[in-house]
Amino acid sequence: MNKRNYAKELEARIEQFQKAGEYPKLLLHACCAPCSSYCLEYLREFFDVTVFFYNPNITSDGEYRKRVAEEKRLIEEYNRQVEEGSFTGMNSGPGARKIGIIEGVYDPGQFYEAVKGLEECREGGERCRKCFELRLTETGRVAKEMGFEYMTTTLTISPLKNADVLNEVGREAAARSDVTYLPSDFKKKNGYKRSIELSQMFGLYRQDFCGCSFSKAQRELEKENRSGL
């Protein structure tokens, strides 16, 4: 059975929009500025993009505030480029559009309720899927409520996240809200590499764990194991 190429599927959709002269309204769930960087550089040429920053899985208030501030700063930088018509060092140009942002409700209790009973699951397993469902279901709800035609997520840019699972969860969430999910695998075509370059270009805070207390604990354990070698 052939593995789906979500990056090519997205390219095919974009070609259709270009032929029709359309710039659809896209609600892009974003987890952090570094992951958003490449996704926004790419998508703002073809869509009217609004970022939806909804991440109750980030269970430290300080960490959450730092990440949402960096997301807003990145968007301000991208919008300044559009205003000034200056795209030096960017893989987007005059066709780029300004980007909006909506900040969702920050309530870590929603995350803990969603993953209740899965606290001991391995990172990348069923607990993560429940977290994806929580965030993308809310993305779908907001997309429908605010009149967006499409939704997708920056989460597929991570080499540590399963694009098949994310696209399945995204399609289901979009269907429940009667909006269209855009397939993606943003890590492809050097997307992840480009996100690192853009993070350096803009001096973005680049965290080393997904966001929840479980992922942070696992990362700390990995660091301890490496230091003990």
Image: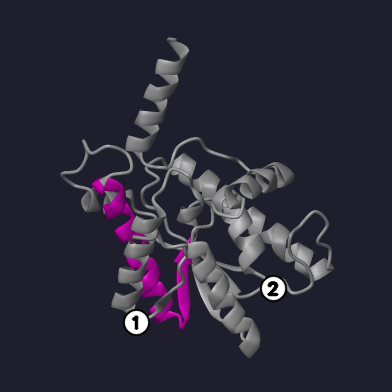
Q: Is residue 53 above or below residue 228?
A: below
User: Is disc 2 in contact with disc 1, using a CB cutoff of under 8 Å?
Assistant: no
In front here: 76 or 169? 169
The residue carrying pointer 1 sits among few (fewer than 14), some (14 to 19) or many (20 or more) residues within 10 Å by Cα, namely some
Q: Is residue 6 visible?
A: yes
Magenta region: which residues?
A: 126-153
Q: Which mark is residue 97?
A: 2
Q: Is residue 127 above or below residue 99?
A: above
The number of callouts visible is: 2
Q: Which mark is residue 188?
A: none
Quadrant placement of the N terminus: bottom left
Give x and y (percent) for residue 57. 36, 48
Q: Secondary structure at mark 2?
A: loop
User: Looking at numbered disc 1 in the image, what kind of residue is underneath it?
Assistant: Asp
Residue 218 falls within the magenta-colored stretch: no
Predominant secondary structure in magenta? helix
Q: Is residue 126 above or below residue 147?
A: above
Q: Secondary structure at mark 1?
A: loop
Give x and y (percent) for residue 39. 59, 59
Q: Is residue 72 visible?
A: no
The residue carrying pointer 2 sits among few (fewer than 14), some (14 to 19) or many (20 or more) residues within 10 Å by Cα, namely many
Q: Which mark is residue 178?
A: 1
Who comes first in sequence, dot 2 or dot 1?
Answer: 2
